[in-house]
Image (cartoon, rainbow, N blue to C red):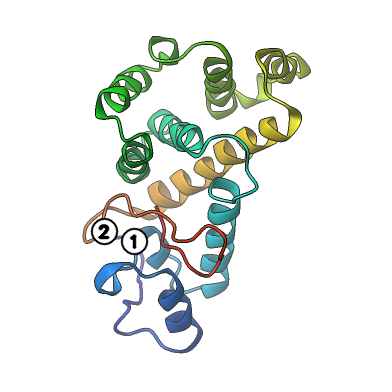
C-alpha cells in the first residue's frame, strides 16, 4: 500500500475518522494516496482541497476531460503508475469513447500529443510537457503561445495548476511507495457543488 505506516478506516478515530467519512468510497474504501496522509490529517485536508478545487471545481472553464488528459500526461512524464491508472480510467469515463481514449493514450505514451491533438489542445499539452520536464526554460513567449492558440489567462492558470498538482501528487506517490493495492480505480468526485461530497479520482 505504502512504505510508511497508515491508519485504516476501521482503526481511525476522531478527526481522521470524520475525514475518512467525507472521502470514502464503496465499502468504506479509502484510496491509498489519501490513506498515506493518515498520520497527519491536516496534510490530507490540504491535499484534498488542492485536488478538488484545482481539478474539479465547477467554476473551471477548461473541459474536465482535458484537465484529466493533462493529469495523465504529467503522470506519464513522471512515470507515476498509480496516477496514470486512476486518471486514465477517469478520462475514459468522461470521454465515453474508448476509441478516442485509446488514441489519446497511445499518443501520450510516446510523448507525441500531436498524434491525437491539434490547435488549442495541442498547444496546451506542449506547455504541460515543458512545465513538467523543463520548467526553468519557460518564458513569457510560452504563455503568449497559449493565448495565441485561444486560451484566456484564466484557462492558462487552470492548465498550470493542474500540471503543478500532478507534480505534487506524483511525488507523493513515488516518494512514499504508494500502490493501487485495494484501491477502486477511477472513482470520481461526487457532487461538484458540495466540497464535502466527493471521493478521490
Tags 2 and 1 touching, CB below 8 Å? yes
Please state the horizontal and vertical placement of residue 142, each as a whole percent of the image: 69, 17
**What is the secondary structure assignment of the residue under circle 1?**
helix
Left or right: residue 7 compared with residue 156: left
Q: In which quarter of the image is residue 105?
A: top left
Quadrant where the image shows the N terminus: bottom left
Spatial separation of the CA atoms under disc 2 and disc 1:
7 Å
Q: Residue at x 45, y 38 (%)?
A: 68
92 and 123: which one is in front?
Answer: 92
Q: How many numbered dots are placed on residues in this image?
A: 2
Please state the horizontal and vertical placement of residue 115, each as a whole percent of the image: 38, 10
Q: Residue at x 46, y 52 (%)?
A: 172
**In the depicted structure, whether residue 3 falls above or below residue 156:** below
Mark 1: few, some, or many residues within 10 Å (few <14, many ≥20)? many
Please state the horizontal and vertical placement of residue 195, each as a whole percent of the image: 56, 65
- Residue under label 2, please give it: 183
- Residue under label 1, please give it: 32
Q: Residue 175 carries which label?
A: none
Q: Which of marks 1 and 2 precedes in the sequence?
A: 1
Identity of the residue furthest to the left in this view = 181
Q: Which residue is drawn at 73% across and 27% down?
A: 152
Mark 2: few, some, or many residues within 10 Å (few <14, many ≥20)? some
**What is the secondary structure assignment of the residue under circle 2?**
loop
Amino acid at each position: 500500500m505504502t512504505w510508511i505506516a497508515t491508519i485504516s478506516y476501521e482503526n481511525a478515530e476522531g478527526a481522521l475518522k470524520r475525514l475518512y467519512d467525507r472521502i470514502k468510497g464503496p465499502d468504506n474504501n479509502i484510496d491509498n494516496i489519501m490513506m498515506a496522509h493518515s498520520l497527519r490529517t491536516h496534510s490530507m485536508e490540504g491535499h484534498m482541497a488542492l485536488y478538488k478545487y484545482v481539478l474539479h471545481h465547477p467554476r473551471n472553464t477548461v473541459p474536465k476531460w482535458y484537465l484529466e488528459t493533462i493529469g495523465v500526461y504529467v503522470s506519464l512524464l513522471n512515470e507515476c503508475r498509480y496516477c496514470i491508472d486512476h486518471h486514465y480510467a477517469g478520462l475514459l469515463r468522461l470521454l465515453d469513447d474508448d476509441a478516442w481514449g485509446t488514441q489519446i493514450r497511445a499518443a501520450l505514451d510516446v510523448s507525441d500529443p500531436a498524434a491525437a491533438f491539434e490547435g488549442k489542445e495541442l498547444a496546451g499539452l506542449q506547455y504541460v510537457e515543458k512545465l513538467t520536464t523543463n520548467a526553468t526554460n519557460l518564458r513569457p513567449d510560452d504563455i503568449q503561445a497559449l493565448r495565441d492558440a485561444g486560451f484566456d489567462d484564466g484557462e492558462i492558470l487552470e492548465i498550470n495548476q493542474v500540471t503543478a498538482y500532478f507534480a505534487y501528487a506524483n511525488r507523493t506517490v513515488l516518494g512514499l511507495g504508494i500502490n493501487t493495492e485495494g484501491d477502486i480505480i477511477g472513482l470520481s468526485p461526487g457532487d461538484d457543488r458540495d466540497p464535502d461530497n466527493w471521493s478521490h479520482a
